[in-house]
Amino acid sequence: MTSSADGIVPDTKNWTWVLERPCPECGLNPRDIAPEQVAGLLREVTASWQDVLSGAVDVPGGVTVRPDPATWSPLEYGCHVRDVFRVFDGRLQLMLAEDDPLFTNWDQDQTAVEDRYGEQDPATVAVELAEAGAGFADHFDAVSGEQWHRTGVRDDGARFTVTTFARYLLHDAIHHVYDVTGVRAGPSSAAC
């Protein structure tokens, strides 16, 4: 596997398996997330990211330092989570407005290089991530009833309902908190 221009080896795993079983790395079992919990958990993980980006949570080497040349720094992961919230919020809106929309490909690794994640200001990223997370959580607050069963399809054929889509994206944001802090999601607080 080759690395990108910034030295990161692109993640080519299909993470949809987390919809079937607990994640052995971060400890989250996305199947345990009920639709009525989604907005609150999104707000919790957004707050966790505020702690990471502000330095309130001790991360080895600091927020801008990569633990090794092939692994994103906490700042780069924060940029990624901010952009996941933005991209996935758009996809949620598509799922609610259209019947079974096809999501266009988003190359997260290319975005990281083009947008120079490692050179962004942590305070600015924290504000942008907070805004993206709050808006996204508000949109999930508005989902109700049969809307949770609406569907969308990723360009690789992976099919989601709004419920499984929400679980998938929450795992991503929570798992990345684990990536930078080493703190596993616990049974009483999925976003720790």
Image (spheres, helix red, strand yellow):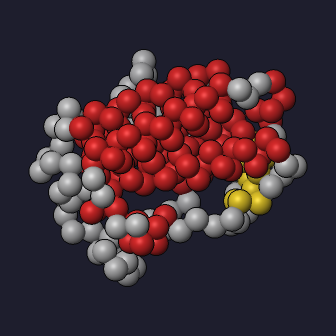
Residue 74 at x, y = what percent? 27, 50
Where does residue 48 sit, x and y in percent of width and height? 35, 32
Q: Quadrant of residue 186?
A: top left
- Tell which residue pokes out farthest to the top in this image: 188
Residue 49 sits above or below residue 117 on the image: above
Q: Nearer the viewer, residue 49 or 11?
A: 49
Q: Is residue 102 left or right of residue 178?
A: right
Q: Is residue 55 visible?
A: yes
Residue 69 percent across, percent down from the top left: 21, 69
User: On the rendered structure, is 87 left or right of 76?
Assistant: right
* Residue found at x 27% / y 48%: 122
On screen, residue 11 versus residue 163, left or right, reads left
Q: Is residue 118 left or right of residue 150?
A: left
How many dots with numbers?
0
Would you identify the image quadrant in which residue 49 lies? top left
| Residue at 28% over, 62% down | 118
Q: Residue furthest right?
A: 99
Work out whether 89 lies above or below 36. below
Q: Residue at horizontal 67%, vertical 40%?
A: 164
Q: Residue at x 64, y 21 (%)?
A: 36
Residue 114 drawn at (x, y percent): 42, 72
98, above or below 166, in the image:
below
In the picture, which quadrant includes the N terminus?
A: bottom left
